[in-house]
Image (cartoon, grey):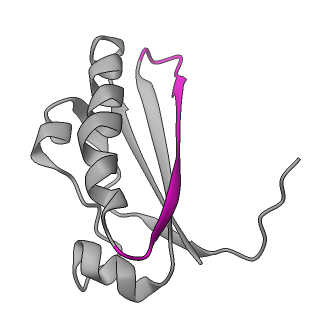
């Protein structure tokens, strides 16, 4: 399994709206992709006043990710409606091969 890590930053004023967009529109579209295995969405308030979101999505293979974003799998897939709410984001993502998944 492949884990794909991406981060984006927004203002506190846009934080709730961005989270709603993720859960109501973006994640349901991703969930429809064959080979998508789930996600973890996290956020934190920074001393700078920004809110950072981190998304780790899980995929069955790199080929599935290619079907999602195209040949350049390191490119972030940024929907236009999300870009309007974020002040900045990672334009490149990081991929990890999952070795284990321990649960408490």
> In the displayed structure, does residue 8 sit left or right of residue 47?
left
Residue 45 covered by magenta stretch: yes
Left or right of 52? Residue 90 is left
Residue at image point 36% right, 58% down:
31
**Residue 57 appears anywhere in the view:** no
Q: Quadrant of residue 18?
A: top left
- Residue found at the very far right of the displayed protein: 104
In the image, residue 35 above or below residue 21: below
Image coordinates of residue 23 in percent, x first then y, are 35, 36
Magenta part mainly helix, strand or loop?
strand
Magenta stretch, residue numbers:
34-49
Of all residues, the one furthest to the top in this rendering is 13
Q: Is residue 42 above or below residue 92?
A: above
Q: Where is residue 93 drawn, in percent x and y?
A: 41, 63
In this rendering, is residue 39 above or below 85?
below
- Identity of the residue drawn at 59% across and 78% down: 1
Residue 28 belongs to the span the image colors magenta = no
Q: Position of residue 72 (x, y in %)?
A: 27, 81
Vertical arrangement, residue 22 with respect to residue 18, above or below:
below
Q: Is residue 51 visible?
A: yes
Q: Quadrant of residue 97?
A: bottom right
Q: How many marks?
A: 0
Residue drawn at x 47%, y 48% as measured from the top left = 55
Point out residue 49 in the picture as x, y percentages from the top left corner.
43, 14
């Amino acid at each position: 399994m492949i884990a794909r890590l991406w981060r984006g930053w927004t203002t506190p004023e846009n934080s709730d709206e961005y989270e709603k967009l993720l859960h109501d529109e973006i994640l349901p579209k991703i969930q429809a992709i064959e080979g998508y295995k789930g996600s973890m969405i996290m956020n934190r308030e920074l001393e700078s006043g920004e809110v950072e979101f981190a998304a780790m999505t899980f995929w069955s293979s790199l080929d599935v990710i290619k079907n999602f974003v195209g040949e350049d799998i390191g490119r972030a897939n940024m929907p236009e409606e999300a870009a309007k709410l974020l002040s900045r984001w990672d334009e490149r993502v990081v991929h990890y091969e999952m070795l284990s998944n321990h649960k408490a």
